[in-house]
Image: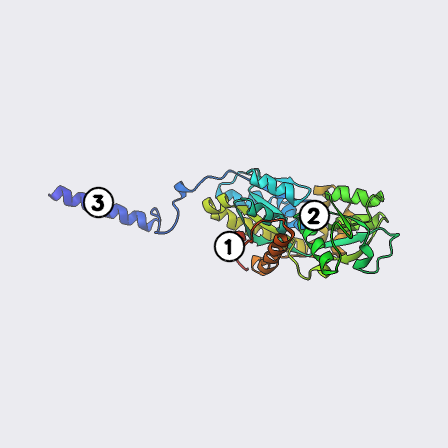
């Protein structure tokens, strides 16, 4: 009996010592040994100044640096020409995180993509450019012309078609709209194969600096304060490693703040990464009507408006709700 009392006292003492040392896990938290290991994070992005935060964070090593303490040993990124192929890659499980226009996300989620918008990336920042020899006097001037923009279901396609309809112009009847990648669209207008383009920065500045076009309408005039790109994370990563998702949002904020305060260096980083001319990037950032914006709370209504527009256009087959599209739990205002 005496031996049993001694053993019991010893066990209690050991337990108390472990608790004091932090060796036991408080109720409601995850035991680190049970956390799903994630060694690699794969990020998709597009070569637009809208998504400069991703590029800055990658080139300065911040993704790797910030995620390493959470067990991530490698962060890779892959460039996509537009949002449609990027969302196809996410549907296939080839990327975990996407910097992408809000509109392609709607199409992807409506067809089964397991992912959520966790933060904003930017607002506005696209331009309608017409050939120099055209006399633009307003939307009606576009009748009979051919306009190149991103493929159906993208932000640019959605905003352009909606703006044309608001100005009593029927897309694909009064004007011809051609879906193209940005490089192909720039080539098309410089070669005189199309009359106008509606593209995100820096492509409009590339055309203007080549003397092949003029900016006549900015996207903020078509749809004031509209959301453009968003930060999307796979549902699997959200469920299994919310700590990683939270850090991804923080690192994005870190890169946004750096870009805003170091615009010349950010432009040089972008130009080097994408192969753009530095002068085009700098001109683009000096004249765009865009803004880098991380807070997802301010983009809810525009994104839901896109969902309605896309439903009306027949791009998606069912209405989408805030809960279908967003997880607002990861963004923390600093």
Extreme residue toward the left, this view: 1
Which residue is painted at 64% across and 40% down in the image?
Answer: 85
For mark 2, what is the residue?
48
Q: Mark on residue 323?
A: 1
- The secondary element bearing badge 2 is classed as loop
- The secondary element bearing badge 3 is classed as helix
Tell which circle, 3 or 2, labels the residue nearer the N-terminal end: 3
Question: Which quarter shows the N terminus?
Answer: top left
Q: Is any part of residue 294 visible from this angle?
A: no
What is the x, y in percent for residue 70?
A: 49, 44
Extreme residue toward the right, this view: 133
The residue closer to the viewer here, 223 or 266, is 223
What is the x, y in percent for residue 176?
A: 77, 48
What is the x, y in percent for residue 236?
A: 49, 43
Residue 73 vs 53, above or below: the answer is: above
What is the x, y in percent for residue 310?
A: 63, 52
Q: Mark on residue 10?
A: 3
Q: Viewed as shown, does residue 30 lie left or right of 208?
A: left
Contact (CB < 8 A) between labels 1 and 3?
A: no
> Between tags 1 and 3, which lies in front?
1
> Between tags 3 and 2, which lies in front?
2
Q: Tag count in the figure?
A: 3
Tell me the CA gap for discs 1 and 3: 52 Å
Contact (CB < 8 A) between labels 3 and 2?
A: no
């Amino acid at each position: 009996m005496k031996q049993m009392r001694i053993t019991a006292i010893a066990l209690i003492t050991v337990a108390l010592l472990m608790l004091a040392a932090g060796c036991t896990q408080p109720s409601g938290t995850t035991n680190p040994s049970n956390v799903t290991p994630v060694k690699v994070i794969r990020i998709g992005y597009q070569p637009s100044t809208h998504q400069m935060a991703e590029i800055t964070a990658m080139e300065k090593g911040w993704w790797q640096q910030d995620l390493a303490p959470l067990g991530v040993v490698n962060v890779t990124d892959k460039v996509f020409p537009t949002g449609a192929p990027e969302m196809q890659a996410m549907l296939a499980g080839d990327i975990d995180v996407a910097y992408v226009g809000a509109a392609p996300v709607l199409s992807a989620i409506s067809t089964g993509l397991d992912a959520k918008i966790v933060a904003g990336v930017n607002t506005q920042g696209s331009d309608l450019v017409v050939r120099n020899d055209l006399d633009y006097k307003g939307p009606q001037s576009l009748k009979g012309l051919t306009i190149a923009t991103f493929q159906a279901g993208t932000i640019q396609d959605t905003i352009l078609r909606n703006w044309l309809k608001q100005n009593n112009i029927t897309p694909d009847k009064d004007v011809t709209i051609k879906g193209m990648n940005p490089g192909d669209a720039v080539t098309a207008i410089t070669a005189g194969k199309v009359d106008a383009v509606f593209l995100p920065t820096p492509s409009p500045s590339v055309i203007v600096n080549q003397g092949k076009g003029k900016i006549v309408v900015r996207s903020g005039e078509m749809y004031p304060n509209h959301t453009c790109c968003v930060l999307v994370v796979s549902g699997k990563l959200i469920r299994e490693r919310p700590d990683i998702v939270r850090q991804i949002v923080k690192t994005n904020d870190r890169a946004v703040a750096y870009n805003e305060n170091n615009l010349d260096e950010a432009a040089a980083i972008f130009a080097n990464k994408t192969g753009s001319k530095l002068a085009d990037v700098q001109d683009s950032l000096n004249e765009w009507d865009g803004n880098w914006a991380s807070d997802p709370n301010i983009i809810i209504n525009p994104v839901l408006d896109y969902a309605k527009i896309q439903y009306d256009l027949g791009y998606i087959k069912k209405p989408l709700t805030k809960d279908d599209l967003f997880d607002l739990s990861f963004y923390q205002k600093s």
